[in-house]
Image: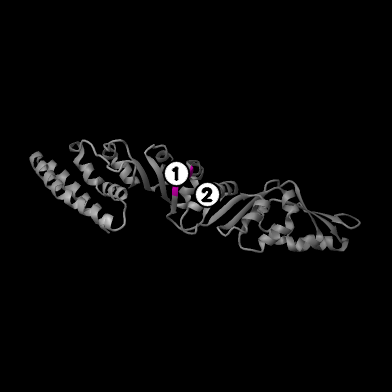
């Protein structure tokens, strides 16, 4: 609470200084002297309270600097330099302070090191190039996090944490999700984030199905892989995660035996746009005509049947 109170107090001080100089230079100087006179004992008091609260001397000092940035910014050219007595201690600032208080930070003798919070996913890359910044805490929507996923992965260890500001799952391709898990980016997202994974192979889908963070899976794979893993897909279709299947080779027939058709219907029904042709073997001659006529299970128009004793 003392830091919040100090920040608000310092912001008001800055507004008063700026307004007084706009009114009259002499008045501005007088107000500045008065504010500095009362600010010194206030900051000493804050420093003592922070020390009593368990802060180390370096942490208490840089915390006071961060809280006083607004006042220091308003003093402008009247501040020549700032000496950080605990050189090397990290100063915590927000993205807004980084952008609007650069002039003050530049006056710290010997350089400075920052941890920046409230960083949008789009600004993270630019911030990461800033040699003064040791760590970033990103705060953004799931859509923006997904859009900048590759960039956030590239930043690596400098991304300390990610906060998702909206509800719903983050939509990523299977490759991007798996790389994010490998690079520890997924683990940096606070709370219990969920993911909708697209462009997963059938093999990917089987491993993703047991990942509690993945709530939806869309498969994209070839006809041969769909048929070769039809039993695994039937199991997935019986759960809640498999959302849809895209057949990447729709002109290649899905070759199934007649006794597989009933169990395969849940899988075939998930193939988007009905983009497949079906070749069924082992159909009794007496059943072939009825099978096409009844359309139960539903048959694509390009279905063919290997009938015991001939082709239908």
Q: Which comes sooner in the sequence, label 1 or label 2?
A: 1
* Residue that appears at 73% across and 59% down: 231
Residue 184, numbered circle: 2
Give the side of residue 289 with respect to residue 31, left or right. right
Give the magenta part as a residue range: 156-160
> Badge 2, how many Cα within 10 Å: few under 14, some, many 20+?
some
Q: Give coordinates of residue 247: x percent, y percent.
A: 68, 49
212 lies above or below 204: below
Q: Secondary structure at mark 2?
A: loop
Q: Give coordinates of residue 72: x percent, y percent.
A: 22, 43
Majority secondary structure in the magenta region: helix
Give the side of residue 12 with respect to residue 55, left or right. left
Give the side of residue 96 with respect to residue 123, left or right. left
Give the Cα distance between marks 1 and 2: 12 Å
Q: Give coordinates of residue 212: x percent, y percent.
A: 57, 60
Residue corresponding to mark 1: 158
* Residue that appears at 26% across and 49% down: 64
* Residue that appears at 50% across and 45% down: 149
**Quarter the C terminus occupies:** bottom right
Note whether residue 272 is visible: no
Q: Give coordinates of residue 273: x percent, y percent.
A: 65, 53
């Amino acid at each position: 609470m003392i830091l919040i109170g100090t920040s608000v107090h310092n912001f008001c001080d800055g507004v008063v200084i700026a307004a007084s100089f706009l009114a009259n230079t002499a008045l501005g100087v007088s107000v500045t002297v008065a504010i500095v006179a009362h600010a010194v004992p206030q900051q000493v008091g804050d420093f003592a309270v922070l020390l009593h609260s368990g802060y180390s001397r370096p942490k208490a000092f840089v915390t006071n600097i961060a809280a006083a940035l607004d006042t220091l910014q308003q003093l402008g050219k009247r501040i020549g330099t700032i000496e950080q007595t605990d050189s090397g201690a990290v100063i915590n600032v927000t993205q807004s302070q980084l952008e609007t208080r650069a002039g003050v930070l530049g006056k710290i003798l010997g350089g400075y090191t920052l941890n920046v919070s409230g960083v949008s996913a789009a600004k993270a890359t630019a911030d990461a190039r800033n040699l003064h910044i040791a760590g970033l805490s990103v705060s953004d929507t799931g859509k923006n996090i997904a859009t900048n996923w590759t960039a956030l992965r590239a930043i690596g260890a400098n991304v300390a944490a990610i906060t998702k500001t909206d509800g719903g799952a983050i939509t990523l391709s299977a490759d991007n999700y798996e790389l994010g898990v490998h690079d520890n980016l997924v683990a940096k997202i606070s709370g219990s984030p969920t993911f909708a994974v697209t462009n997963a192979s059938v093999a990917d889908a089987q491993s993703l199905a047991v990942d509690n963070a993945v709530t939806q899976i869309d498969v994209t794979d070839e006809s041969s892989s769909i048929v070769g893993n039809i039993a695994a897909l039937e199991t997935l279709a019986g759960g809640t995660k498999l959302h849809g299947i895209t057949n990447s080779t729709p002109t290649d027939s899905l070759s199934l035996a007649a006794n597989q058709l009933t169990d395969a219907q849940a899988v075939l029904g998930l193939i988007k746009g009905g983009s497949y042709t079906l070749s069924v073997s082992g159909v009794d001659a007496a059943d072939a005509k009825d099978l096409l006529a009844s359309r139960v299970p539903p048959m694509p128009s390009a279905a063919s049947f290997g009938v015991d004793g001939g082709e239908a």
